Image: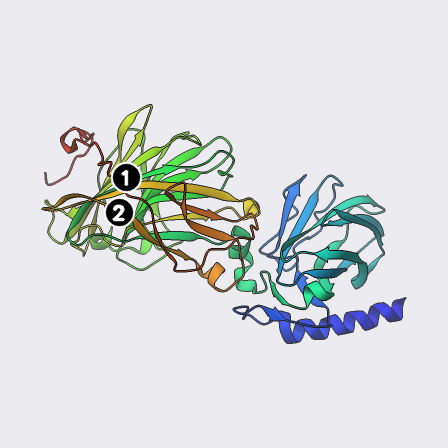
Amino acid sequence: MNIYRSFLLLICTCFVFSSVRSTDNSSGFNMKNIFSEIPLQGNTYTVAGTVDVIMPDNGLLIDNLWTNNETVIRTYFRISNAGDLQLSLKYSATRESKIRITCQGKSFEMTCTEGKDQVIPIGKIDRVDSGYIAVDFQGIEKKGSIFPQIQSLLIEGKAAEGTLYFVNNPDFYYWGRRGPSVHLGYVMAEGDTEWFYNEVTVPEGDDPVGSYFMVNGFSEGYFGIQVNSETERRILFSVWSPFATDNPEEIPADEEILLNGKGSDVVSQSFGGEGSGRQNFMKYMWKTNITYKFLLRCRPDPFRSGYTEYTAYFHSPDDGWMLVASNSRPKITTYCTKLHSFLENFNTETGYITRKVYFDNQWIYVVGKGWQEITQCRFSCDNTARQKQRMDYRGGVENDKFFLQNCGFINDLTEKDALFTRPAQNTVPDIDFEKLPSSSINNANQ
């Protein structure tokens, strides 16, 4: 038995060196009659029990933390061939323990003996369909204080002979666990767009923690709703500084985003880490299955030469129109450009849960022309999807509305850069600009 394990480990180690350690997964892996190794790091979530098992930033995914037999750890990978699938396991253990592995409704119980970098077979799954496969790990009993450190899954068989998709690049371990971000770029009418109106509805159950449903995006910032925790939700409006840095303290005074005014319950502060600038947010417990309205104004600042003024309004059926904030950005004079919406997950622990959002009744107000309806958009996705580290994303038209969906290891994909058209509604936004809340805007030069 020890000779078999040593020989199997040698084969797997040679394969990992030649293939899995490659950072190019743009076309997946085409493998036949050989074990394919899927690292747990970047592809695994805690789906039940304690959540501290996952350690995405260190060398081992499971690092002396798997102690509870109620914890369920789930690993995902995508296959392109249907057929039989043979699973094996690579792990290290300080003491003997027994664990349960479940895949496609079939469970296997196995004893993990003491040792480092051991490879042992799990079992065979018959007639697996193409698409994402989930493998669950759960501890049964242990002689020591922890269950084994699982390092990777090894797969073979007909189902493993085609192209495989999983997070194989260490640079994507973090982004892969977050999941792909998806976008809609709106096709705009010609002219100077001063106002951008959009409506958003999140279906019930499609709002896990970590979701950001960005409704009114523009070249210099974004405006949407977030799920920050089980008890906190936000309306978020941010504008990037023209100074390229992830550290807001480095921004020179003449390139800072200025605050002209904000709503009474709005926090306005600098932000960094993804470029830098000013973010404005208010805590607001928005609900699923309710349609909310967003209105953004972009225009050359009438009070400061060389600046552009951005003002964001949010509408709730309960509270009407509310001012979020008005900011001014230096070194640019523009109206609204590159209008878009997107959907992203910013929580690595919830990347296995799908989320979905509808955007509807988009309009722009063009200077000298009035309201113009938007009925076309182009679907796109981020580098996590384009590098095929994650293949669970959708977008387009559904129920006569634009929609986006990501994460959850869904199998239906939307073609990247596809153009979509929704039916025109001809429902012009009923907005009296003069009555929008503005009393808390206090422009220094006004």
Q: Residue at x 56, y 53 (%)?
A: 411
Query: What x and y, as percent, mark residue 394?
Result: 47, 51
Quarter-wise, where is residue 69 in the image? top right
Mark 2, residues whose alpha carbon is within 10 Å: few (<14), some, or many (≥20)?
many
Q: Residue at x 27, y 58 (%)?
A: 243
Query: What x and y, as percent, mark residue 320?
Result: 28, 26
Please say if 164 is above or below 369: below
Measure the C-alpha gap from mark 1 to mark 2.
10 Å
Q: Nearer the viewer, residue 143 or 170?
A: 170
The amino acid type of the residue labelled 2 equals: Ile
The residue under label 2 is 374
Label 2 element class: loop
Q: Nearer the viewer, residue 273 or 179?
A: 179
Q: Nearer the viewer, residue 154 or 324?
A: 154
Q: Is residue 296 left or right of residue 181?
A: left
Q: Residue at x 15, y 38 (%)?
A: 443
Q: Nearer the viewer, residue 248 or 136?
A: 136
The residue under label 1 is 425
Quarter-wise, where is residue 389 in the image? bottom right
Mark 1, residues whose alpha carbon is within 10 Å: few (<14), some, or many (≥20)?
few
Query: What x and y, as percent, mark residue 429?
Result: 22, 35
